[in-house]
Image (spheres, rainbow, N blue to C red):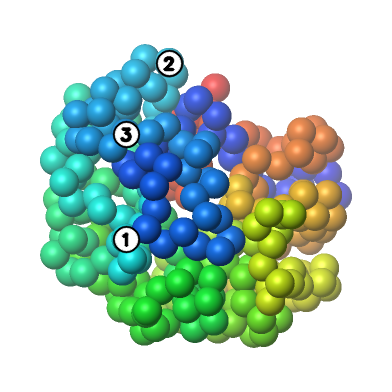
Amino acid sequence: MRGDRLKVTAFVPGKTYPTISITGAECALNCRHCKGRYLEDMYPATTPSSLYNTARNLVSKGAKGILISGGFTQNGFLPVRPFLPTIKKIKKDLDIVISLHPGLVDEALAKEIRMNNVDVIDFELIVDSFVIEKVKGLKKKPSDYLKSLEILKKYGPTYLAPHLLIGFGDNGILKEKEAIDSLRDYDPYLVTFLSLIPTADYFIEDCVLPKKEDLVDLFKYARKFKSEIALGCMRPSRFKDEIDQVLIERCLVDRVAVPRNKIIKTYNINTVKACCSLPREFFPKFVD
């Protein structure tokens, strides 16, 4: 099956949609699967003024959008509140798309995020107690994540993109399917899947990636909703070498973040230079 028959889009952020960490390389959680290493690849901006200056500098180099992220507190929140007025100013002055990875939220914070003109919320939804307690090291429950999802849907920005984890737990794909089921009443425009990346330094012995046939079954299961489905940028080489092609050919994904160049060429896939959670209304801004 050729690319012109496939409804799939590749997303390659690059300098057009960089990520900024408002905590620099610091994270109070120090999760087992990350230990802060992903923060090292982000642009640090640990004060509101440095956030503004960093955003302005990135825009001067070609950025048309930014993802604001960082390390989480021991309660699972991104300490973003002091930065929100600056985010509003960035939106007004620089006219860029702004995504936010907030972690858990309460009602007041969700309202403030919306009032300060964040465009997109990337929300990591976890319904597996093992992952929350043993991997994330949080004293929280799945209900806390589901409550944050509900709050963001009701009080947060228009665009809410749940991110579901693959391979972080110890129950095969059962919890992944449970996470999909939990979205039934929320009708998200997009559901993004992120996969554990085992490495020599950060391998979690209790977590094993599902087999290829189980992964195909999982994505077929996700297809029962009308939401678009994205393969997020967090996935190991095994996905890119074995799974990406299968999911694309079987039309089980709509978006693929940073696929191999040979995949883009083989299937003649259109490319958007942004994060894979970008709402379609913003596509023209990121297509040459």
Image position of 29 with respect to 129: above or below: above
132 vs 17, nearest the viewer: 132
Residue at (62, 70) in percent of width and height:
168
Image position of 91 with respect to 119: above or below: above
Residue 137 at x, y percent in the picture: 45, 72
- With 26 as the anchor, is 136 left or right in this view? right
Task: Please name which of the two marks, 1 or 2, marks the residue nearer to the observer.
Answer: 1
1 vs 171, nearest the viewer: 171
- The quadrant in which residue 149 appears is bottom left
Dots 3 and 2: beta carbons under 8 Å? Answer: no
- The quadrant in which residue 171 appears is bottom right
Image position of 59 with respect to 169: above or below: above
Q: Which residue is mark 3?
A: 45
* Dot 3 alpha-carbon crowd within 10 angstroms: few under 14, some 14 to 19, many 20 or more: many
The kind of residue on which mark 3 rests is Ala
Q: Which residue is mark 1?
A: 73
Q: Could you tell me how far apart the alpha carbons at marks 1 and 2 are, in whole angstroms?
A: 31 Å
Name, please, the residue furthest toward the top. Answer: 60
Q: Could you tell me how far apart the alpha carbons at marks 1 and 3 are, in whole angstroms?
A: 17 Å
Residue at (32, 42) in percent of width and height:
22
- The quadrant in which residue 288 appears is top right
The kind of residue on which mark 2 rests is Lys
The kind of residue on which mark 1 rests is Thr
40 vs 107, nearest the viewer: 40
* Residue 220 at least partly seen: no
Q: Report helix, strand or loop for mark 1.
A: loop
Task: Please name which of the two marks, 3 or 2, marks the residue nearer to the observer.
Answer: 3
- With 3 as the anchor, is 94 left or right in this view? left
Q: Which residue is mark 2?
A: 61
**Sequence-earlier tag: 1 or 2:** 2
Residue 59 at x, y percent in the picture: 36, 21
